Image: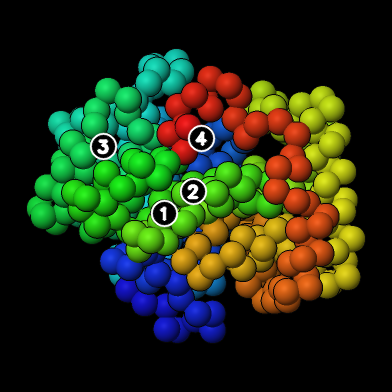
Amino acid sequence: MTTTDSPFAARRLGAAGPEVFPLGLGAMGMSALYGPTDRDESIATVHAALDAGITLIDTGDFYGMGDNELLLADALRGIPRDRYLLSVKFGAQRDPAGAFIGYDTSPNALKTSLAYSLRRLGVDHIDVYRPARLDPKVPIEETIGGLAEMVQAGYIRHIGLSEVGAETLRKAASVHSISDLQIEYSLISRGIEAAILPTVRELGIGITAYGVLSRGLISGHWTRGSGGAGDFRAHSPRFQGENLDHNLALVETLRSIAAEKNVTVAQLAIAWVAAQGTDIVPLVGARRRERLAESLGSLGVTLTADDLAQIEKAVPAGSAAGTRYAAEQMAHLDSEK
């Protein structure tokens, strides 16, 4: 797949991965974690993304307990398979009440998960398949070995990883080529810059960056009182108390810079991530067409060296208050160890 019909230059997911449109669509919020959802609007947003040229759509088999894959199946029905790439995460285990109860990325478990995802999505292959987190019980080499078998069988086109550190990346790449690492990266989440980013570049692995707006916190739209029932951000350290006040003050400094360039805060923040390297593909978690349109506007934003210096001064690395997940979730992040 190529994006030669787009006015925007395609980016490649690593040295061995596919070419994709320079923004990807993250579908998680269409089914879970961000409060009430609107299925019809979600499907319309997927269609608008495809019409705009977006090719990469990211989901997980545990998003909405499989509902996100079923939603995408409805949205993509009748659309030629070569018009989109599916990135799917697996391995997160949930009980009937929806509680997360650990990870299983063993070869047999991943093959079972893959079989169900293929059925729910209504496709015969997944373009990038990746464990959602490092399973502490299963050596990454075993997981990658099982995935490699599925590549050989034609059920997977490429192998990706998510939220793993430099050492794990090296171990995985010794077994099979890795297309990309999906990991949080934004103006206020820059932990990858010290060791992970240099390692993926050494190994020829791309980055699909999620959380580029820090779950809406630095979108320019979040205020105290935003959110609602069922929104997990109510329990996120960065969205609580004095942390929220501090972080929203950072957003206001960005707002003044954005105003000088006649763009929105969200567009500035997304453009900053994209400016960190052509091997980085920002994922935007738009659930509505107007938010998608705003995100697509970031593609027309050019940041000069002076702009980047001004942004760095306004929001330097480490300036956010609060961790990006609660402590229990942080403990599962190999990327933070």
Question: Vertically, is 324 above or below 277?
Answer: above
**C-alpha separation, residue under disc 3 versus residue under disc 4:** 17 Å
| Residue beneath the point at 55% across and 49% down | 194
Q: Which residue is mark 2?
A: 195
Whether label 2 touches label 1, CB < 8 Å = yes
- Residue 287 x %, y %: 60, 49
**Residue type, numbered disc 3:** Ile
* Residue 316 as seen in the image, left or right of residue 31: right
For the question of whether residue 80 can be seen, the reply is: no
**C-alpha separation, residue under disc 3 versus residue under disc 1:** 17 Å
Mark 3 or 1: the one toward you: 1
Q: Earlier in the sequence, mark 3 or mark 4?
A: 3
Q: Which residue is mark 4?
A: 336
Whether label 3 touches label 2, CB < 8 Å = no
Q: Which residue is mark 1?
A: 199
**Residue type, numbered disc 2:** Ala
Mark 3 nearby-residue class (10 Å; few <14, some 14–19, many ≥20): many
Q: Earlier in the sequence, mark 4 or mark 1?
A: 1
Question: Vertically, is 160 above or below 29?
Answer: below
Whether label 4 touches label 1, CB < 8 Å = no
Q: Earlier in the sequence, mark 3 or mark 1?
A: 3
- Quadrant in the picture for residue 272: bottom right
- Quadrant in the picture for residue 80: bottom left
Residue nearest the viewer, comparing 81 with 285: 285
* Label 4 secondary element: helix
* Residue 230 as seen in the image, left or right of residue 72: right
Q: How many marks?
A: 4
Image mark for residue 140? 3
Q: Which corner quadrant holds the N terminus?
A: bottom left
Residue nearest the viewer, comparing 50 with 221: 221
